Amino acid sequence: MIYMARPQMGDEEKAAVIAVLESGQLAQGSVVSEFEQGFADYCGVRYGIATTNGTTALHVALLAHEIGQGDEVITVPFTFIASANSILYVGAKPVFVDIDPDSFNIDVDQIESAITPRTKAIMPVDLYGNPAEMSRIREIAARHGLAIIEDAAQAHGAEENGKRMGSWGTGCFSFYPTKNITTGEGGMVTTSDDCIADRARLLRAHGMRVRYYHEMLGYNFRMTNIHAAIGLAQLPKLEAFNERRIANAAYLSEQLPKDKVKVPTVRPGTRHVFHQYTVRVLPPLDRDKVREQLAARGVGTEVYYPVPVHRQQLYLDLGYGYQSFPESERAAREVVSLPVHPGLTQQDLETIVEAVEAL
Ligand SMILES: Cc1ncc(COP(=O)(O)O)c(C=O)c1O
């Protein structure tokens, strides 16, 4: 079976973990600091604040911006549930805006009509590693005095006009094993703002600056040196991983039959890092049958995401219905992701193309 993801673990990662185990410094320490600085440099920001996962990075980012009860945050319903859940964690209200059908990202033309006096932030999601329209979003945010809390969980190294995702406001990343680099589980808040960085550091460690003196209600969202060691060993490989993903995606987009699937588009001036390679299944093909047929030919697939957030049980009382976000609904019905990870061989890529051709 050609799997959807395969973490690329080499001797460097193994040696780095063993070195931490032998050092005796297992919890958050200097290895975490080194990973934070390395990833911040990679993103083009001053600070990285490592957390236990991408969800806690989003949670910390919202709290660092002092977003809470009575506030609204604009985001998309076509995303992983963690984007919206983080808004609920802080007691704020997610206000959804539909996606653009080409990019699967927030439809920027619809943002301004969703802004109210309670809106505090816009949370764009760079879905599948495809950068949201950050220049335009930044302009809208500046005009309305809103923060940008970017869910870049899937977009390590993605760019718009040479500027990396995670550097447009406050960025939030995940290092889950399927991601473009991993720490096992892990997350990072990225920012160049001194005050946000300081608050984020306090929030992820029980509000503690001086040992056992607690300035605010914080959490234990600390990354361990063990996880950071894996991340530090992965970081120098990230560009090669991204280039491999981009090349795999280019091959698939060229070879896949266009009467069966609609291949992803890359917006001019952007770098899509293909965390996922996601196509739309075209009629009359049925997506579930397509998945079965591909599996029978040894090609793993996944649907990210089959139910938009506003129709998840937890979100029903926000009052959105089936008609609220037609493009998110259509994407949820039509998309399927094919393997694109850097561990694929040329033979794997050919098998994927042949399997789609045979549909
Ligand atoms: C878009 C998006 N946001 C947030 C997250 C949460 O990250 P984590 O799984 O590391 O908590 C993920 C990870 O799957 C994601 O894909």
Image (cartoon, helix red, strand yellow):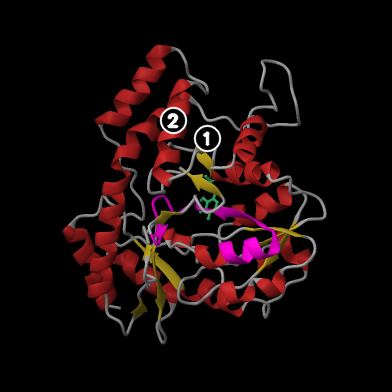
The range drawn in magenta is 138-161
Q: Is residue 337 left or right of residue 348?
A: right
Estimate how packed mark 2 is, as few (under 14), some (14 to 19) or many (20 or more) residues with alpha carbons within 10 Å: many
Question: Going by the picture, which residue comes out furthest to the left?
Answer: 347
**Looking at the image, is mark 2 or mark 1 earlier in the sequence?**
1
Q: Position of residue 82 (x, y in %)?
A: 60, 52
Residue found farthest to the front = 143
- Residue at image position (35%, 18%) is 19
Q: Are marks 2 and 1 in contact (CB under 8 Å)?
A: yes
Is residue 76 shown above or below 333? above
Confirm whether the magenta stretch covers residue 145: yes
The residue at 63%/40% (across/down) is 196
Residue 198, visible in the rendered structure: yes
- Label 1 is placed on what type of residue? Ala
Q: Residues within 10 Å of mark 1 (few under 14, many from 20)?
A: many
- Quadrant placement of the N terminus: bottom left
| Quarter occupied by residue 13 | top left
Whether residue 256 is in magenta: the answer is no
Give the x, y percent position of residue 51.
55, 35
- At numbered mark 2, what does the secondary structure look like: helix, strand or loop? helix
Q: Closest to the observer: 12 or 162?
A: 162
Residue shown at the point (22%, 59%) measured from the top left: 348
Q: Nearer the viewer, residue 334 or 206?
A: 206
Q: Is residue 116 left or right of residue 147?
A: right
The C terminus - image quarter: bottom left
Mark 1 sits on what residue? 50
Quick one: 179 or 188, which is closer to the camera?
188
Q: Quadrant of residue 111?
A: bottom right
Vertical arrangement, residue 174 with respect to residue 134, above or below: above
User: Which residue has dot 2 on it?
Assistant: 228
Relative side of 6 to 212, left or right: left
**Which residue type carries mark 2?**
Ala
